[in-house]
Image (spheres, helix red, strand yellow):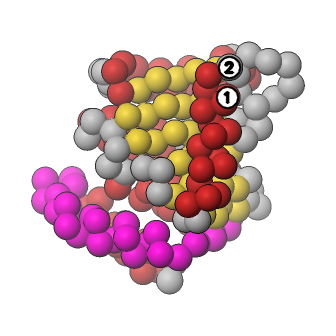
């Protein structure tokens, strides 16, 4: 199944690169993936590929609560989403305000309109150690996987959850963090 998902991801990415977007094909792939929860493990690129697939096929919203976000490929997928007018909200731990936060300047350098990209930093004591992304309020990506290059070398995991009630629990948590 993982090989099929990766193959579909490659096909969609190649078609986007050559301007051959097919909304019906994208919808079919997303609907197929939404029918069943999936789980991936590292060390490998499986988690990164899955994340990029979901970011690249988002149609309306992406909400990311992430301790650490420095992976250039994932940042490019976020940029690609904003180019498609997907509304992106990213909530990060305050540790990203140090030198690692500079990696997110890549987003700013790519002329992303502020209307559909917002980044906020956790300001309370302790860590904001969540690691999840909610895509179009239809699927949540959950796991130990930080959105970094180094995570591909660690023993990490990523799981997709498609149960509506569970997605709402994550959305409520994200909205609470966002509005604090």
Q: Are marks 1 and 2 in contact (CB under 8 Å)?
A: yes
Please report the residue visible at 19 percent of the width from the left and 61 percent of the height from the top.
23
Q: Which residue is mark 1?
A: 177
- Total marks shown come to 2
Please report the residue visible at 19 percent of the width from the left and 67 percent of the height from the top.
24
Please report the residue visible at 36 percent of the width from the left and 19 percent of the height from the top.
114
Comparing 5 with 30, the one in front is 30
Residue 126 highlighted magenta (yes or no): no
* Quarter of the rendering containing residue 161: bottom right
Please report the residue visible at 58 percent of the width from the left and 72 percent of the height from the top.
38
Crowd tier of the residue under label 2, counting other residues whose Cα lies within 10 Å: few below 14, some 14–19, many 20 or above: few
In the displayed image of the protein, which residue is found farthest to the right? 126
Position of 172 relative to 59 (above/below)? above
Position of 122 relative to 60 (above/below)? above
> From which residue to which does the magenta span run?
15-42
Position of 58 relative to 89 (above/below)? below
* Quarter of the rendering containing residue 178: top right
Comparing 59 with 164, the one in front is 164
88 vs 38, left or right, is left
Instruction: Give x and y (percent) for residue 112.
Output: 32, 24
* Quarter of the rendering containing residue 166: bottom right
Q: Which residue is mark 2?
A: 180
In the displayed image of the protein, which residue is found farthest to the front? 165
């Amino acid at each position: 199944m993982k090989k099929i998902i990766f193959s579909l991801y490659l096909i969609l990415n190649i078609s986007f690169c050559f301007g051959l977007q097919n909304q019906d094909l994208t919808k079919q792939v997303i609907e197929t993936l939404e029918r069943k929860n999936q789980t991936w493990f590292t060390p490998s690129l499986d988690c990164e590929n899955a994340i990029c697939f979901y970011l690249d096929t988002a149609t309306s919203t992406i909400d990311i609560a992430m301790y650490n976000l420095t992976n250039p490929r994932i940042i490019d997928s976020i940029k690609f989403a904003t180019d498609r007018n997907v509304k992106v909200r990213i909530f990060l731990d305050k540790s990203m305000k140090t030198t690692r936060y500079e990696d997110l300047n890549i987003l700013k350098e790519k002329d992303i309109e502020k209307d559909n990209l917002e980044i906020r930093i956790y300001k309370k004591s302790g860590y904001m150690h969540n690691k999840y992304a909610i895509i179009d309020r239809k699927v949540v990506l959950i796991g130990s996987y930080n959105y970094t290059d180094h995570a591909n070398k660690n023993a990490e995991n990523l799981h997709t959850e498609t149960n509506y009630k569970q997605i709402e629990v994550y959305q409520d948590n994200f909205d609470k963090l966002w509005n604090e």
